[in-house]
Image (spheres, helix red, strand yellow):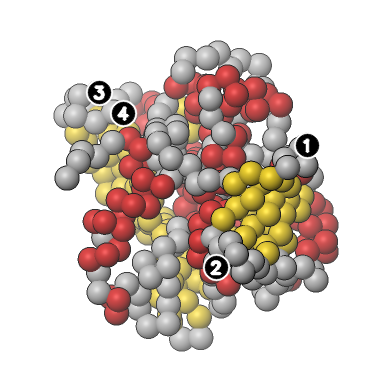
Amino acid sequence: MGKITLSHGAGGVETTKILEKLIFNKVDEDLKKIGEGLGIDYPDDAAAIPVGDGYIVVTTDSYTVNPPFFPETNIGGLAASGTINDVLMLGGRPMAALDSIIVEEGFPEEDLKKIVDTMISIFKRHRVAIVGGDFKVMPKDTLDNIVINVVGIGYADKLIIDKELRPGDKIILTGPIGEHGAVILALQHGFSIEGGELKSDAKPLVDLMTMLLDKYPDKVHAARDPTRGGVAMALNDWAAATDTVIVVDESRIPLREVVRSYAEMLGIEPMSLANEGVALLGVDPTAAEEILEEIRSLGYRDAVIIGEVKQSKKYKGIVLLRSVVGGYRILEAPRGELVPRIC
């Protein structure tokens, strides 16, 4: 038995392995989900419990981002946005939340007020009720600033289950990648980011997903907000779950030059950086162009089809990246610490 490292919480390969070792392999198959719902039989950012003709969608996440304040929002805004998005990506419509806040003794009350106000304002804007929670204080130097855990609850008529991705489906990315990861990475390394060139993209994707659920309930086969581990981890998860090969065109991936520069300078693959306001979608090829135009009409001007799902007799469960010069390389799932405490 080894020791837990930061890499185990980074959202990459090590996270998957430790969860399989500690939890997934020890839970009986009939206790991994409820009825025809979804649970840790197929781990996603949310679970689904059958109720009547639909499903209660439930998610929980702990937010530990360091620093707790960053351009555009703070840990409270991140917690609210991330919770809402996790419900949405399974096909749920967010209804309620419970929050648990743990702060370090001596944490400035004014900072705590700003964080909580930001979280409440986002839930209020999207009509998500705050129905319960908890508040605790840890002795000084036993906790680094603040941790927020949020439980999100929603309802779905029909689930979006990523393992239903199929050969021929087009992969849509709704915006530039690595924005949140780059700003947290820069702050953790002490870089000055004045001037607004770097900022978190954290935001709820309610407008986007509500449109898709209303207009294309049978055309969206997979949806993910690629947070820890980024687009690289999400695509690898999809490929592994469906025994397919996902081919992505590197030249089509939206990436701002400033984010690329920071990632290269610090030796991080941009495809592995966290995103908090971007959706990765697998959609029916017959509706892909129409869906793309609808997404752009909502203001997601950088949305683009970046690739396609393919079936191969020889290869299964891999992601191929077609480079700018025309060659191919395997896009591996991220390993190592990446950016610790990024969300």
Q: Judge depth for marks 2 and 4 and give the one in front.
A: 2
Work out whether mark 2 precedes mark 1 in sequence or the reverse, and give the earlier one: 2
Rendered position, 220 above or below 267: below
Work out whether mark 2 precedes mark 4 in sequence or the reverse, and give the earlier one: 4
Q: The C terminus appears in which quarter of the rendering?
A: top left
Q: Amino acid at mark 2?
A: Thr
Looking at the image, which residue is at 36% across and 45% down?
14
Looking at the image, which residue is at 69% across and 50% down?
248
Question: At numbered mark 1, what does the secondary structure look like: helix, strand or loop?
Answer: loop
Q: Position of residue 13 (x, y in %)?
A: 41, 47
Question: At numbered mark 3, what does the secondary structure look like: helix, strand or loop?
Answer: loop
Question: At numbered mark 2, what does the secondary structure look like: helix, strand or loop?
Answer: helix
Q: Judge depth for marks 3 and 4 and give the one in front.
A: 4
Residue matched to label 4: 145
The answer for how far apart the CA atoms under marks 2 and 3 are is 49 Å
Residue 178's label in the rendered image is: none
Rendered position, 88 above or below 189: below
Residue matched to label 3: 106
| Mark 1 surroundings: few (<14), some (14-19) or many (≥20) residues within 10 A | few
Q: Judge depth for marks 3 and 1 and give the one in front.
A: 1
Q: Position of residue 240 (x, y in %)?
A: 51, 61
Q: Is residue 259 left or right of residue 104?
A: right
> Marks 3 and 4: CB-CB under 8 Å?
no
Q: Amino acid at mark 1?
A: Val
Q: Is residue 238 visible?
A: no
Work out whether mark 1 precedes mark 4 in sequence or the reverse, and give the earlier one: 4
> Marks 1 and 4: CB-CB under 8 Å?
no
Q: The N terminus appears in which quarter of the rendering?
A: top left
> Marks 3 and 1: CB-CB under 8 Å?
no
Residue matched to label 2: 242
Q: Judge depth for marks 2 and 1 and give the one in front.
A: 1
